[in-house]
Image (spheres, rainbow, N blue to C red):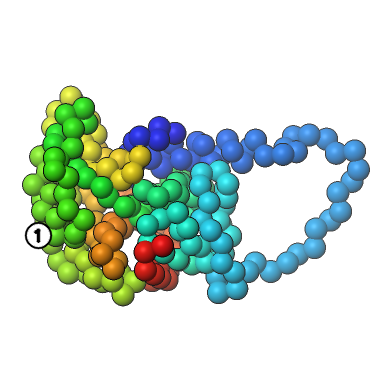
Amino acid sequence: MDADLMRLPRKSAVVCVALLVSACAAGPGVGEPSSTPSPTPSASPSPSPAACLRPLLDLGATPVLSPCAYVLEQFPVGITFDIPEGDPPGWHVGKSNPGAAILLWYTPPEISWGLTFWSVDNVYVDPCDAAAGELDPPIEPSVDELVTALSELPGFQATAPVDVTVGAFPGKKVELTALDSGDDCPQPIVFRAGEDQADLSPGDTIALQILDVDGVRIVVFTIEPSEPDAAVQAELQQILDSIRIGPPS
């Protein structure tokens, strides 16, 4: 995966799936004969989210997430959420680092849903040309500063911000749509977060929830398909409803 670019909502998921599947296939003992018969495993119940707490590890470390509570240990603020039982189970880690945490639902090769958390640093002067540099001075670390920067971002159309609350913390919700800027700009960049960037394809829309967590700004948004699946949509809503946000770590 290109560590410098996360294309959302379409391309990041495709890349993540390819790496997750290869990492799983490359696991120890896959395809190797065993010299002794393996014992038949006894069935054991899956832990409920309330019964366990695990760190959300980076790409490939946890190919399929079991029902459990997961915490973003590397993120600038403490965020915990529950992965519910699924049939089939399909939630995977796309990325987990100080700048971005991406949760994806898929059954290979189809990718449909996602939940993403970002610690946004700045936006680019020209979303079609990262080489042109970022805003200087950079945007201040407040919700309103990022809302203003996104609303004025060339190549995008933004809705008026509305008040939201996520995990008991206030913020603003802004819907951002990438406009068609021609063949020279197939993926305009929305923002930078640490070593990662988020971009959109022309015509794509994302709903950004920009939160103030005790003075730390984070961005939350979902990836949703054009043809929803009611069961997976219900799982995503369960995860959203379970989000707990703590003070900066």
Type of amino acid at the residue the image marks with label 1: Ala
Locate residue 157, reporting x and y percent: 11, 47
Quarter of the rendering containing residue 23: top right
Residue farthest to the right, as pictured: 36
Secondary element type, mark 1? loop
Residue 202 picture quarter: top left
Q: Is residue 216 left or right of residue 236?
A: left
Residue 227 appears in the picture as rendered: no
Residue 65 visible in the picture: yes
Name the image quarter holding the N terminus.
Answer: top left
154 to the left or right of 91: left
Q: Quick check: 142 above or below 199? A: below
Q: Does residue 210 appear left or right of residue 114 in this picture?
A: left
Outermost residue, top side: 184
Left or right, residue 56 beside residue 179? right
23 in relation to 62, above or below? above
Q: Quadrant of the C terminus?
A: bottom left
In the image, residue 173 lies at what x, y percent?
A: 20, 62
Task: Tell me residue 230's x, y (percent).
Answer: 40, 62
Q: Which residue is mark 1?
A: 160
| Residue beneath the point at 48% across and 62% down | 71
Q: Residue 46 location in percent, x, y?
A: 65, 67
Residue located at (23% from left, 38% from top): 189
| Residue drawn at the location 21% of the way across and 27% of the way down | 131
Q: Total label count?
A: 1
Residue 34: quadrant of the picture: top right
Residue drawn at point x = 36 percent, y = 53 percent: 116
Q: 140 or 83: nearer the eye?
A: 140
Within-10-Å neighbours for mark 1: few <14, some 14–19, many 20+: few
